Structures are given as structure tokens and as C-alpha cells.
Amino acid sequence: MKKVIVGMGTCGLSAGAQNTYDRLSELLSKNTGSFELSGTGCIGMCYREPLVEVREGDRRTIYGGVTPELAEEIFEKDVRDGKRLDEHIVYSLDGEGEPSGSEAEFLSAQTRIVLRNCGTIDPESIDEYEESGGYRGIRKALLEMTPEEIVEEVKESGLRGRGGAGFPTGLKWSFAASYDSDTKYVVCNADEGDPGAFMDRSVLEGDPHSVLEGMIICGRAIGASFGYIYCRAEYPMAIHRLDLAIVAAREKGYLGKNILGSGFDFDLKIKQGAGAFVCGEETALFASIEGQRGMPRIRPPFPAEKGLWKKPTNNNNVETFANIPWIIDQGAPAYAAYGTEKSRGTKVFALAGKVVHGGLAEVPMGTSIKDLVFKIGGGIKEGRKFKAVQMGGPSGGCIPDSLSDTPVDFESIPATGAIMGSGGMVVLDDTACMVEMARFFLEFTQAESCGKCTFCRIGTLRMLEVLTRITKGEGREGDIEKLTELGERIKEASLCGLGQSAPNPALSTIRFYRDEYEAHIKSQKCPAGGCDALVDFFIDAEKCTGCTLCAKNCPVDAISGEVKKLHVIDNSICVRCAKCVSSCNFDAVYKS
Ligand SMILES: Cc1cc2nc3c(=O)[nH]c(=O)nc-3n(C[C@H](O)[C@H](O)[C@H](O)COP(=O)(O)O)c2cc1C
Ligand code: SF4
Ligand code: SF4
Ligand code: SF4
């Protein structure tokens, strides 16, 4: 039976996958034969969506950029006649052979444990999950293992939390298991507040059952019989697929009373979050589930003792839970075989920014930044120079190109002053201004501070004021020292991770790009040309068609020129709003 599979994650749908799917559905319904059409989650190649796979046994052919017209051609030639359309193939695999296709390296350079089913199964079908080995872990955990043995297995695997801090998961479970209580909770943190991160969303959209299975196993291990998935409301497709998965799992007896006849009861519920970054912090998240304002609480007591509704609670990230069924099914040593001594297993990264292949990639811990950016990511867009990666979202920091051999793991990344975080990786080229980068992230954390601690509330505001002045060319002698001093104090005196890490982008860019700060302050120059206030604007005589749009959009009449003739900018009048850049359809306006 030939299967035609369309990538229907948020990335696929935003690239037009629904039209592609509808066209294929029409064609397949008119043509009786042994074809089957289904949707799947994100396979990771977001940059080549819409993606369509034609599968027959272990023969896989994935086509990229599939418009409804191309879908028709794929149907006529490949699905019906078995002839591949070579020029559109991004990945193909024949049985055990070597993969080929224009993007073969993107997938073959990865090791997929968390993403094992993403882009291959229909996330809305529990049968497909089971056929791919799903709910095998739960059978083993519930029918063959004691709770203590489950905790030991997770400890032995070396799995560390994927939500940012990298706390050993098995150890965390043992704490929650050690408290006696008639009520305990398992919480899944699906808040994913980091700008640029979409790992958790992709797992939830592409393989929701793996998260449920991980949570049920955790419930059994710590003695909890109820769970919550805290998912931001901006993830409607993830919530929809989780809803379907919960209903299907209940019907099949994986959720509810006396699961698989083991005597163990467990059920769960989704709680939608309103999208405040601080609600990802676990104690704030508990407050939000309880119906209170999402503000972090002082620890101790730790969640293992008094978490949700003051009951022993274990909270883990989506990716952490998605690893669990595989670990239980395949055994801890199989998992521990990947990664480094202290950071075991694999990690999913969301590659974004100036990288050619923006998307989702799962690699063994310890893979170098260079391999992620150049091997999987395909290098820098437009052949520009690689400058840095920004890791760990707004709490993270920048790692310069000179340190691109750094392995990504929980020891090596913090040594550079950045953090692993949850896996967001923004690739920057030589046009990125590092002061502006720090300002951008601080603006985010400053706005998201819950305001409970003075240092976080006021300190980040002062830092933001200084950074904004510098990017406008109004920096003063002593500003760098002021930023460093403030940053260190905020880190020391803040209650939760938001304040403790908010200064990281500024501190790490000062560490590696101090000369850029100095150029802004001492000579009012932005060496990378990233701060509009500090550059001059020009029009390229070769490209300008004299369409007059830029002049019409300039708020201060700084642009002159006749229709169909070269236009010119008077930089002594220009207020550097960059409207001319965005209004020109011919890419003729450039900055110096
Ligand atoms: C401001 C802030 C935001 C956070 N956001 C998230 C998040 O979106 N998802 C997440 O899993 N953890 C987030 N965390 C970390 C959680 O508090 C917690 O450490 C994590 O969910 C534990 O799961 P793990 O052990 O599986 O990593 C955040 C922490 C802070 C301080
Ligand atoms: S550090 Fe910031 S976000 Fe965290 S509790 Fe204090 S004020 Fe709120
Ligand atoms: S919008 Fe572009 S093409 Fe048109 S006049 Fe201005 S610079 Fe020239
Ligand atoms: S940057 Fe703004 S003010 Fe300056 S020329 Fe362009 S549109 Fe006019």
C-alpha cells in the first residue's frame, strides 16, 4: 500500500500545506487504487515546506516546496506510475541504503529519539503511534517494573531536564516519590515562552502521545494519579492534538482507572496559559493553574514537597517527557550511549535566524555548534560571514564564531557565559549588532518581569535605558561599567530565573564584543550597521527605477528625484526611520 503523507504542522500549514493536502485528497478520491493519504507533524525541514512524502514499505521519497500543481505531478508520476521526480526530491531512502536528495544531510546528520515519530506518523492516530512502538514503555513500566525500578532506570539513563536548567530527571522523580501524600501531581511544562523556540510545540503537534506516555510513567514512578499539561493558548493545534490524544488514550485504557489492569489510576487535563513568559517558571506556573496571578514563589519548599495546591509535584518539560517512553522501552544504557559523560542523550534545537536551513534538528549532546550551523543548518544565508549564535533565548547569551567548536552540552555552553536553555538557537551574521541584540532581549525580559523583586523590576529597566541610549548614539563614558555592575547585582538579588538570567545577553556581548560597545559610545558608530540611528542611507543607482515610493513614504522629505530617474537621500535631513528600506520593492536602498 502506497502512503502519501503531508506535513501538517503549524510550519507546513503556514506554507500552504492545506491546499496541497486538499488537492491530493481530490486526486486520490477520484483514483481508486491502493493509496492512502494522511497528515503528519513537522519533520524539521521548515525551510522546504510544504513537504509531501510518498512511502511504500521502507521506500521513502520526500518532496519539498509542494504546491497543489506539483502535488498533481507527484500524484501522476510517482504515486500512480512509480517514477520519482528527481528535481523536487529533498530526501529519499530505499530500505537500508544511503539517503539521497538535495537535503539528505539535514536528516542523516541527526539522531532522532524525541523526534522519532515527528513527521512520520499521523499524530491524530493512536494506532499509528502504537504501530511505531508507542505505549510499549507504559506496558513495561506498569506491568513489569516497580515504581523504584522506573526511577532507577531514568536515573541510569542520565537524562537531564530539557526545560533549561538541566536538572537530573531521575533524581527529581526520586524526590517527589519520597514524600508521602494521598495526592500528588505530574505537571508538564508546555509554556515554551522563549522567542525563537518551537521544539515543544513541534513535539506536541507531531507526537502528542509520547508526552502523555511519559507523564503516565512518571505518575506511576512518583505515586501520582493526576496530571496537568500547561500549554500556552497561542498553540491551538498542539492543544487540539493533545485533546484528541487524551480521548483516544482513555478509550484504549492508557488513561483512567486501573490502567492495563495494573491497578494504577491516572488521568490528566490541559490548562491553557495566557502566554506570560514568567508563567514558564514552575512555581509561577503552579500559581497560574491554581487560578492565581502567575508569580514565582520562594523555594524551599520545593515542588517535590509542596508544589501544585501544596501537594508533592513533579514538573518536567515536554521534551523531557517525550524521552521517557523510549528510555523505558529501549533501556537506560541505550539512551546513555548517546551524548557526553555528563550530558547524556540527544537534544532538539530550533535553528533560526540567518541560517540557510531554519528548522528543527535533534543531535547527540556534544555535537559542536559549527556542525549544527554548517552541516545541518547549511551555513549562513546569502553566503555572509557567521558571527555568533544566540542560545537560551532571552535568558541566554551569545557565543562568537571563534568558539564555534564548543560542544552543545550542559557543561560547555555555560562555560562561554551563555546557557543551553531549552534549545532555541538564533544564528547571527556579520550584519547583526550585538548591542542591539542585547537591547532587544532585555526589552523582552524587562516587559515580562512580574515585578515582585525590585532588582528585576527596576534594574532591568535601568539596563534597558542604558542600552537604548547606546544604540541611539547617546552612550556615555562609564556605561559599560554601569551595565556590568547592574547586571551582576540583578543576577544576585532576583528571586527567580527570569531576573537571575535577564542580564546574560548584555553581559555576554560585553564579554565578547566590548569593542562594538566602545565604537557606539566613543565614536557614535555601529560597526555592523545594525543600529539604524547610527548609519547613513543611500540609494543604489543600478537598482533604482525611480518609482518614487520611497520619497512618498519618507516622513521628512529627505528623498528627492524625478519619476523614472535615480532618487537621492539627503542624510542631513534623514531621521533614520528606515521607511525607505521597507518601501522599496527593488532593494535599492542600503545602509552604510
Ligand atoms: C522565566 C522562566 C521561564 C521558563 N519557561 C519554561 C518553559 O517555557 N518551559 C519549560 O519547560 N521550562 C521553563 N522554565 C524552567 C522551569 O521553571 C522548570 O525548571 C522546568 O520546566 C523543569 O523541567 P525539566 O526538569 O524537565 O527541565 C522557565 C524558567 C524560568 C525562570
Ligand atoms: S526575578 Fe523578576 S520575574 Fe522573577 S520573581 Fe522577581 S520580579 Fe518576578
Ligand atoms: S522606492 Fe526604490 S526604486 Fe523606487 S525610487 Fe525609491 S529607491 Fe528607487
Ligand atoms: S530613513 Fe526615513 S527619514 Fe531617512 S530617508 Fe529613509 S524614509 Fe526618509
Image (cartoon, rainbow, N blue to C red):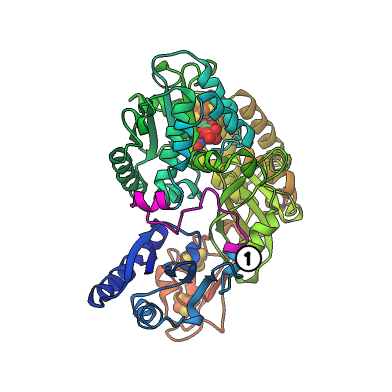
Q: Position of residue 101 (x, y in %)?
A: 56, 74
The residue under the point 44% across, 26% down is 295
The residue under the point 65% across, 40% down is 333
Count of all numbered marks drawn on residues in the image: 1
Q: How crowded is mark 1: few (under 14 residues within 10 Å), some or many (20 or more)?
A: many
Q: Quadrant of the C terminus?
A: bottom right
**30 shown above or below 306:** below
Q: Where is residue 266 in the image (x, y as percent from the top left)?
A: 36, 29
Q: Where is residue 308 in the image (x, y as percent from the top left)?
A: 41, 22
Foreground residue, 78 or 44? 78
Q: Quadrant of the N terminus?
A: bottom left
The residue under the point 53% across, 17% down is 178
Q: Which amino acid does label 1 sit on?
A: Ile
Q: Residue furthest left?
A: 30
Horizontal side, residue 467 vs residue 251: left or right: right
Magenta stretch contains residue 480: no
Foreground residue, 200 or 394? 200
Horizontal side, residue 26 vs residue 432: left or right: left
Horizontal side, residue 455 vs residue 61: left or right: right
**Residue picked out by circle 1:** 380
Residue 332 falls in image quadrant = top right
Magenta stretch contains residue 127: yes
Residue 527, visible in the rendered structure: no
Q: Where is residue 56 in the image (x, y as percent from the top left)?
A: 43, 70
Which secondary structure, mark 1? Answer: loop
The residue under the point 45% across, 31% down is 142
Q: What stretch is highlighted in magenta?
A: 107-131
